[in-house]
Amino acid sequence: MERRKTQSPSKRYLIAYNFFSAALWAGVLTQTVLLVPVMGASNLHSSLGTYTKYVQTLAILEILHLLLGLLKSSLITTIIQVSSRLLLVWGVCDLFSAPQHSVAYASMLLAWSITEVCRYTYYVVNLASPEAAANGPGGLLNWLRYNTFFVLYPLGAGSEAWCVFRALPEAYAWSVQYYWLLVVILATYAPGLYNQYTHMIRQRRKNMRGKKKA
């Protein structure tokens, strides 16, 4: 009888972390879809802002995972991605009322939550059973991960940029230095989106080539 392989404590932790994160982002997605028709996209922040803020803050652990060697990925890229979202939820949408009442806040949460539910769920399946990740539900998750970005990346980045833009008048009244910081950040969105978009296209091609060889 073949002995079942036991998972290391670090792998069990990562499975639990990704499962928990997928569930939390599923909560963001579900509430966004349910609340927008009832209260309107411009009022979503009042009900979902605090929850989303803390769900996104949990992603700081992903930087720690890299520092501890639990994951192999680009530390700089992860820091940029996590910090940019933290700026959005804490330093833009939490501070200023204009982005809170913008439709872009709802579209941003929609793009983020769909992306993260697909990403974290795929990680759970891949960590728990790499074989299953290539077939069945795992294959579907892999397809979603490498195809939904065509729409979700521009939607998310465009929504983020619009939230920052809407915050500028209030930011100027609050702090001229902070206003210029947001202006500089806003100027990075177009090249940043291009960089991320082309990176994902390359990753998609690599993934598709791997599928064909298999």
Image (cartoon, grey):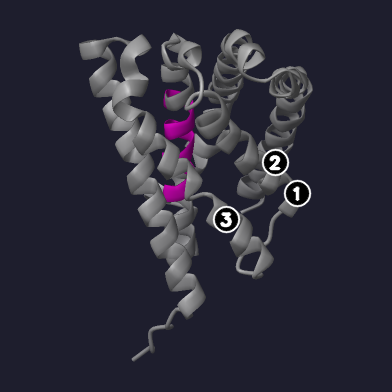
Q: Earlier in the sequence, mark 3 or mark 2?
A: 3
Q: What residue appears at the point 77 percent right and 18 percent down from the top-left corner? A: 187
Position of residue 26 measured from the top left corner of the image (x, y, whole percent) = 33, 39
Q: CA distance from mark 1 to mark 3?
A: 12 Å
Position of residue 77 measured from the top left corner of the image (x, y, whole percent) = 72, 45
In the picture of the structure, the residue carrying the numbered disc 1 is: 76
* Mark 2 neighbour density, 10 Å: few (under 14) some (14–19) many (20 or more): few
The amino acid at mark 2 is Ile
Q: What residue appears at the point 50 percent right and 31 percent down from the top-left corner? A: 89
Indicate whether 5 appears above or below 175: below
In the picture of the structure, the residue carrying the numbered disc 3 is: 62
Position of residue 37 measured from the top left corner of the image (x, y, whole percent) = 24, 12
Q: What residue appears at the point 57 percent right and 55 percent down from the top-left corner? A: 62
Q: CA distance from mark 3 to mark 2?
A: 12 Å
Left or right of 64 in this view: 53: left
* Mark 1 neighbour density, 10 Å: few (under 14) some (14–19) many (20 or more): few
Q: Determine whether label 1 and label 2 are within 8 Å by CB.
A: yes
**Residue placed most toward the observer, 180 or 194:** 180
| Image: magenta residue range | 110-121
**Residue placed most toward the observer, 120 or 17:** 17
Left or right of 10 in this view: 154: right
By secondary structure, the bulk of the magenta-drawn segment is best described as helix
The amino acid at mark 3 is Glu
In the picture of the structure, the residue carrying the numbered disc 2 is: 80
Element carrying mark 1: helix
- Check the image and name the residue furthest to the left: 38
The amino acid at mark 1 is Ile
Q: CA distance from mark 1 to mark 2?
A: 6 Å
Question: In this orientation, does residue 140 appear?
Answer: no
